[in-house]
Amino acid sequence: MDIYRKKLSVIVLFLLPAFIIYFIFGVVPIVQSVYFSFFEWPGIFGVALKPVGFKNFINMVNYKEFWIAVKNVLIFTVLNIIIQIPIGYFLAILLSSFCKGYRFFKTVFFSSVVLPITATALLWKFIWGANENGLLNVLLTKIGLGELSAAWMLQPSTALLTVIIANAWCGLGYHMTIGFAAVTGISEDVLESAQIDGATGLRRIFLIIVPMIWESIRTSIVLVIIGSLKVFDIVFVMTEGGPNGITHVLSTLLYYEAFKYNNYGLGSAISVTIFALSIVMAIISLRLTRQKEL
Amino acid sequence: MSSFFEKYNPITNSKARGKFLTYIFLSAFSIIALFPLYFVFISAFKKSSDIFLNPLAFPNTFNLDNFRRAWELGNISVYFRNSVIYTGVTLIVILLVSTFATYPLSRMKFRFQSVVFIFFISGMMIPIQSTIIPLSYTFGKIAKDNIPMIVLLFAAFQIPITIFLLNGFMKGIPVELEEAAIIDGCTHFEVFWKVIIPLSTPAIVTAAIFNFLSIWNNLLFPLVFISKKNLQVMSIGLLSFFAEMTSDYGGVMAAIVVAMVPPLLAYILLQEKVEKGLMAGSIKG
Amino acid sequence: MGSTKKVTFTILSTILIISMLLSGCTSTKPTNQSEGSSKAAETAAETKAEEKVTIRIMTRYSGTDATTPILEAALKEFAVMYPYITVQNDSVNDEAAYNNKLKTDIATGSPPNFFYMPGVASNVEYAKNGLLMDITPLMEDKEFMDGFIPGMFETWNFEQYGVEGYYGIPFSIGVENFYYNKDLFAKAGIEQVPETMEDLYEVIDKLKAADIVPWEVGAKATWRTGHIHNFLMYKYLGVDMVKALGSRDAKWTDPEVVATLELLKDLKDRGAFQPNLEGEDYDTEKANFLSGKAAMVLNGSWFVGDVINSDIKDKIGMFPFPYFSDKPQFKDDVSVFPQGFYLSGKMTEAEKDATFKWVKFFCGKELQSKMVSEIQRLSARDDIKVDESKLSPLFLDVQNFVSTIKNPGGDSFDFDPLPSMQDRTRNSIIGMLLGNSAIEAAEEIQNEIDRSIQ
C-alpha cells in the first residue's frame, strides 16, 4: 500500500498541469508585485523603478488611513465569521432534513449569492439611504419609529456595518451550500449508530453532526478570513471607502494608491500586508479549530 | 427518496413541532433573502424615475422598455454569449486540472507534501488588484484579446481555492474504498477516475458553482485584457449603464435580471447532479 | 425531476437558448451609408490605396452617456470617409473602470492614440516621459485652429508646469452656474435673481421661510461640493491665488484659504442645503430638482440636456454664481471645465497621420456643430453653424454667459501636480461637512501635500 501511495511518477504527473498554469500565470506576477513593494514607481512604462528599501512600508505604517483600513478589515472579518457561518450552517442542517420544498428553499438562499456584486451593492445602498431615499428609513417611519431613522452610511458608527450586512446577505447562501454538501455527505452508519444510542435531543445531535462536518466548518472559516481580508468589490461600489475614508479596507486603499495616485510601490506594500495577515490569521484559525483525533 | 434523513435529522425527527419550527425558520430567512430580489424584479419593469419615488409598489404596467434598452444599449446578447463561453471553458480547465492536482495532495504521501500544498493555497491570499499591473506588464501585449491566454490567466487564480475546497472533501474519503479498488488491480488513474471522483461529486459540484460565480462576475480581468467590444463579457456590460452623470436604474435592474439567469440555471442543473451522486453514494455505502 | 423543477428548468433554458440565437442574429450590424456617401465619394477618390491602419480611442462616451450617439455616428461617418483607417473604440462609461483600464494601458506603455484623462497638472509626468504627444504640429493647420474659442488650448500648455509644448485638444466645455426654478422663486416672493453673495443668503432665507429646499446638492458624489468650493475660492481668492496653491506658493492652511472652507460649512449651517446631503447621490439630486422639489442647483452646461428632457423645462432659468460685494474684482472668475483629449506619444508615422485625421474630424467644425444642435452641449469652437431656433432658450442663455467670462478656472486640483489631490480635497470637504472643523480639513489637505514632498 505504501508503494502505491508514494509512486513519484504519478504524483508528479497529476500535479504538473495545475502547477504549470499556476506558476506561470499566478506565482510569477505575485512575486513581481512583492518585488515592486521595495521600489517606487509612478506607473509609467519606461520609467525606471527607484529602489527605496523599506520606505514604502514605513510610509504605510505612518499613514493614518492605513490603520483605519486595518481596523475595518479586521472588524469585517470577525463579524463575517460570526454572522455567516452559524446561520449558513444552521440553514444547511435544517435543509438536510429534505423536508418538502427543501429544493425551493435552497434555490432561494442561493439566489442572493448569484446576484452580481454591483447589483447587490446598489440594492443595499438604496436600503440604507439617508432621509426618504432609504428603504429602511421609509419603513421605520411607516411603523411610527421615524426617530430611529438615520444616515446609516454616513455615521462613523454604522457606516461599516451597512457594508458588512450587505456582504453577509449575499454570503449566507455560499456557506449554506458548503454546509449542505457536508451534512449530506455524512455516512449513514454514523447517524444510525447515534440514533441507536438514543441521541435524539437537539443538543446531543449537535454533538454528533457538528464534529462530523468540522472539516467543512474549518474550511468555511478560512475562506471567510481570506475573502474578508481582501474584500474589494462590495466596499468599493457601496462606499468607495468613504465618506472621507472611514470605510476604507486594505484593498480599496491599495486600489486608490496604485491606480489613482500612481504610488504602485505603496500599493504593493499594502498587498504584501494583506498577504501576511491572511497567512497569519489562516494558520491561527486552523490551529485553534484543530480537531483531536477521534 | 431519502426518508432516512427525515428520520434521523435532529430537527425534524421529533414531533410535528420540529417540522413546524423548521418551516418557520426557513420561511423567515427566505423573506430576508428574497426581499431585495423582489425589489430588483419589480424595478426592472418601472420607469427609472419611479423607482426612487415608489420603491415598494408593484408596477402598474409591465413595461418592457427597460429590457429593450438593456438588450440594445447594453449589447447584452453578445456579452451574455461571451460570458457563457468563457466561463464554461475556464470552468472545465480549472476542474480538470485541480481535481488531478488534489489527488496526490490529499491521498498520497510524499516529501514536501505540505510545502506544495501551502504553495498552492497561498495564492488565495493575494488580492487580484496588486497583480494586475505585473500581469499586464508581462503578458499584456500577448494576452490582449487572446481568449485562450485569458482563460489560462483566470484559471491560474482560481486553482488555489479550488484545490483548497476539494482537498477538505477528498481527505474525508475512507481509505478502505481505495484499498478495495487497488486490491482489485486498478491503476492509479483508474482509482482516481472510478472511485475518488464519483465520491467527491458534492465537492466538485460545489467548486464548480463557486468558480462559475467568480468567473461570471469577474470585472477586472475582462476590463484590462479585453478591448474588442464583441469579445466583451456580461460584468462589463452591466457597468456600461453606470454613467457618471446620467444613470439608468431601470435598465440596470433589467440587465441584472438577465444576468442572474445562467448562474441560477447552472445551479439548478448541478443541484440535480449532486443529488444523484448522493443517492448513488448512499446505496453503495 | 419534480414537475415544478422541470417547468422552471425549461423556462430558464429556453431563455438561454433564445438569447444565444439572438446574439447570433445581432452580431452583424448594417452600416448607415446614406449620410456620408457624397462626402465619402470625394475623399475616397482622393486617397490612393493606403495601407491599413488601426487607431485606438478611449473616451467616457459609452452606454447611457448623452454624448454616446454623437461618438457612434462620428465613428460610422469616419469609417466611410477613410476606409483604410479602423478606429477601435474602447470607451467605458464608469469612472472607476475607465481609470483602471487607462492606467494599465499607460503602465504597460501602450496608451490609446486618442484619449481623455482627468486632471491637468497631474499629467505633466506623463508628458515628461514621452507618453503624451506634443500637439504643436497639429496646431499649424490654420483652418482647424481658427475655429476654436481663443485661449482654449492654453489649459494644456504645459510650459506653466515646466514642460514645453501643448498637449491637449479641446473638444467641448462645461461652464458652471446656478439653475433655478422660477415658480418656486416666485412662491417665496423672490423677484430678482441674486447677484452678490449677500443677495444669495437672502434668497436662501426666503426660500427656507417658504418651506422650500433652497439648494439641492447630491454630495455623495463628492464632486458636487467640490465644485461649490471651487467657486467659493474663485470668488473669494480669485483663480490666480488657486493656481498659487498648486505651485506651492500658498498653503491650504493660510487663513484666507481656510476662510473659503468656512464659507462652505457656513452655508450648510444656515440651512442652505437639504438635510443629510452627504448621503444623497447625484441622480436623486437631479430627480428632486427636476420634479420641482428644490429651488436651485449649481451645475454645468452638460445639465441642459437633462433639463430640456424634463417636465418642467419651461420653468428653469439660470444665473451666474454670485460674487462677494467687497470683492468685485473676481466677478468674472468662473468655473469652466474644458474637456479635451490627449494623444499618445508613442505612435508610428502612419498612426499619427490617421489620428490627426480623426482629431480634425471629431473636433472639427461639422461634428461640433452637430453636437451642439443635437445634444446641446457647449463646443470648444466658436465657428459652429447651428439653427438657433432649434435650441432651447436656456442653452442660449448659457452660451451667452460664456462670452462674459474673463478668468476661467477648472477644478482647483487641476493646477496641482499631485494626483491624489482630486480625492483629498473632495473628501476633506465632506469630512468637514460631517463634523470636522474647517481648519482640520485644511490640515488634512496640506498634510497630503507635505507628505509627498519628502
Image (tube, coloured by chain):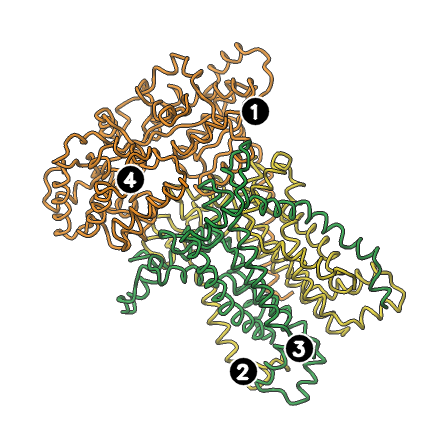
Chain colours: A green, B yellow, C orange
Give yes or no for contact between labels 1 and 2 (Cβ–Cβ under 8 Å). no
**In the image, are marks 1 and 2 on the same chain?**
no
- Of the two numbered discs 4 and 1 on the same chain, state the one appearing first in sequence: 1
Rendering coords of residue C69 (x, y %): 42, 31
Report whether residue A276 is seen. Answer: yes
Measured in 3D between alpha carbons, the distance from the residue under mark 1 to the one under mark 2, in whole angstroms, is 69 Å
Quadrant of residue C369 within the rendered picture: top left
Q: Which quadrant of the figure contains the N terminus of chain C?
A: bottom right
Which numbered disc, 3 or 1, marks the residue closer to the eye?
3
Quadrant of residue A98 in the image?
A: bottom right
For label 2, count other residues whose C-alpha is less than 10 Å away and answer few (under 14), some (14-19) or many (20+).
some
Nearest the eye: B234 or C6: B234
Using residue C218 as the reference point, say whether residue A87 is left or right of it. Answer: right
**Dot 3 and dot 2 within a common chain:** no
Residue under pointer 4: C251
Residue A292: mark in rendering: 3
Asked if the residues shown at circle 4 and circle 3 are in contact, with their CB atoms under 8 angstroms apart, the answer is: no
**Residue position marked by numbered label 2 in the rendering:** B18
* Residue at mark 4: chain: C
